[in-house]
Amino acid sequence: NAGVMQNPRHLVRRRGQEARLRCSPMKGHSHVYWYRQLPEEGLKFMVYLQKENIIDESGMPKERFSAEFPKEGPSILRIQQVVRGDSAAYFCASSRSGTGISYEQYFGPGTRLTVT
Amino acid sequence: AQSVSQHNHHVILSEAASLELGCNYSYGGTVNLFWYVQYPGQHLQLLLKYFSGDPLVKGIKGFEAEFIKSKFSFNLRKPSVQWSDTAEYFCAVIGPIYNQGGKLIFGQGTELSVKP
């Protein structure tokens, strides 16, 4: 049973370019979460999505960042016009749906974004 | 706003020593609490979780944690650490729960180094 998959694992972008980070949740999971870990900081929540819906985007920067989780395919975190401050590890997590669930989130290996 | 505080940034122990990592949270509602571990170069893994019932919860690899509601604490313990426990440990609380999921709010992490 494959875990949460993220690709690419490492991504290098120049300032001003776009970064696209992909996340495939675990089989049977319909909730996806994105977190960011900046150097020397803990993980910070960015966005919570279900299929075709953004449930909570309170942690997303107001500009340049967007996320989607289409009906088919992986969830995408998109960063437009990247700046050096976007350099971080981006983690995706997924969880199941249904009543009585444990709200347990399973994490992927992360994508390390470096902006040069 | 909800927050999680971990008391120690870096803990150094010798093998066989006992471990206790502090975690306090500020959230007035019903809480779901977690400890995650991140081994060097790996993704986050769930150590243990508390949702309800017995406030002393046991997790994997000999770890346990005690939920003390009156102190808003959820400290992690292990009676005897091993070199392989060297990792970063994150305490987390789940924020408002809606649509059967919710964002994790993490503490800043505690880096544990165990000397052989």
Image (tube, coloured by chain):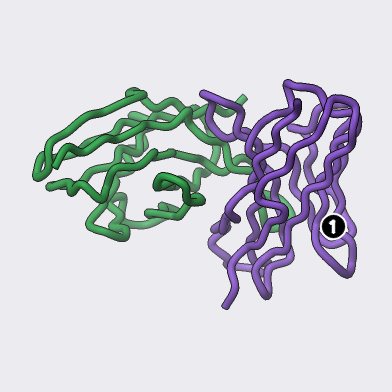
Q: Hue of chain B?
A: green
Q: Residue at x 86, y 34 (%)?
A: A65
Task: Give coordinates of residue A25: x percent, y percent.
Answer: 69, 64
Does residue B32 appear anywhere in the picture? Answer: yes
Q: Quadrant of residue B69?
A: top left
Residue, disc 1: A69
Q: Reply above or below: A95 against A88.
A: below
Amino acid type at circle 1 is: Phe
Task: Give coordinates of residue B52: x percent, y percent.
Answer: 42, 55
Q: Residues within 10 Å of mark 1 (few under 14, many from 20)?
A: many
Q: Residue at x 83, y 46 (%)?
A: A20
Q: Residue at x 56, y 43 (%)?
A: B94
Looking at the figure, which quarter contains the C terminus of chain B? top left
Q: Residue at x 62, y 48 (%)?
A: A110
Q: Chain of mark 1?
A: A
Q: Can you tell which chain is drawn purple?
A: A
